[in-house]
C-alpha cells in the first residue's frame, strides 16, 4: 500500500533502461542499497522541483540518504560516467540536457553597475563638474 502512494518520478520502462546503466557506473558498495530506485527518484524529484533536500517527500525515503548518495556519487564521478554511458548508448542527445538560466543570478557588479566608492565617475557627473568649473571661471592663487 505504501508502494502505491509513493510519487513516481520514473516510469517502469524508464527504470528498466536506467537501472543497468546505474549498476555499471555506481561505485563498489559494502552493503546492498535498500531501495536504489526510491533514492534515485528522490534525487531526480529534488532536482526537477528545485526544492531543498529536506523537502523531499517522505514517501521517497529519508532526505539525508538521497543527499548523501548524490554528494558521494558526485565526488566519485558517477554522474559523469552515467551521462557518458547513456550518450554512448544513444540515450542522450545534444540539447536534451539544459540549464535554466532563470535560476542563475549574476552579481550586480557583473552587469556593469557602479561599485560602491568607485573613484571613476560616470560621463554625466563628469559633464556636470566641467560645467560648474567653466561657470565659476579661473581661480586666482
Image (cartoon, rainbow, N blue to C red):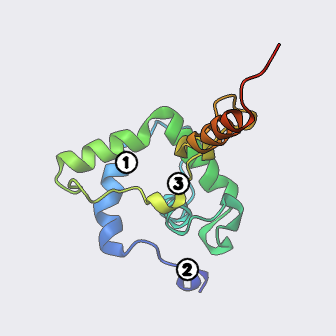
Tell me the residue that label 1 is attached to.
23
In this figure, which residue is indicated by the disc labeled 3? 104
Quarter of the image where one finds residue 55: bottom right
- The residue positioned 64% from the left and 65% from the top of the image is 61
Measure the C-alpha gap from mark 1 to mark 3. 33 Å
The C terminus, quarter of image? top right
Q: Secondary structure at mark 1?
A: helix
**Mark closer to the chain start, 2 or 3:** 2
Would you say residue 40 is visible in this rendering? yes
The residues tagged by marks 2 and 3 sit, at their Cα atoms, a distance apart of 36 Å
Dividing the picture into quarters, in which one does residue 66 lie?
A: bottom right
Are the residues at dot 1 and dot 3 in contact (C-beta closer than 8 Å)? no
Q: Residues within 10 Å of mark 3 (few under 14, many from 20)?
A: few
Looking at the image, is mark 2 or mark 3 nearer the viewer?
3
Relative horizontal placement of residue 3, taking residue 56 as reference (left or right) = left
User: What residue appears at the point 62 percent right and 37 percent down from the top-left corner?
Assistant: 126
As displayed, is residue 114 above or below residue 57? above
Q: Is residue 55 above or below residue 6?
A: above
| Residue at image mark 2 | 3
Residue 20 locus on image (x, y percent): 31, 53
Q: Nearer the viewer, residue 109 or 76?
A: 109
Question: Across the whole image, how many numbered discs are drawn on residues?
Answer: 3
Amino acid at each position: 500500500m505504501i508502494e502505491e502512494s509513493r510519487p513516481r518520478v520514473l516510469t517502469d520502462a524508464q527504470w528498466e533502461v536506467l537501472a543497468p546503466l546505474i549498476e555499471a557506473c555506481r561505485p563498489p558498495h559494502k552493503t546492498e542499497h535498500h531501495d536504489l530506485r526510491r533514492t534515485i527518484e528522490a534525487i531526480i524529484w529534488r532536482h526537477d522541483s528545485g526544492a531543498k533536500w529536506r523537502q523531499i517527500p517522505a514517501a521517497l525515503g529519508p532526505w539525508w540518504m538521497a543527499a548523501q548518495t548524490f554528494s558521494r556519487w558526485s565526488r566519485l564521478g558517477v554522474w559523469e560516467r552515467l551521462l557518458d554511458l547513456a550518450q554512448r548508448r544513444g540515450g542522450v542527445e545534444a540539447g536534451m540536457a539544459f540549464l535554466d538560466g532563470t535560476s542563475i543570478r549574476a552579481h550586480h557588479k557583473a552587469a556593469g553597475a557602479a561599485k560602491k566608492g568607485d573613484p571613476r565617475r560616470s560621463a554625466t557627473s563628469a559633464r556636470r563638474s566641467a560645467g560648474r568649473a567653466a561657470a565659476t571661471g579661473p581661480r586666482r592663487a
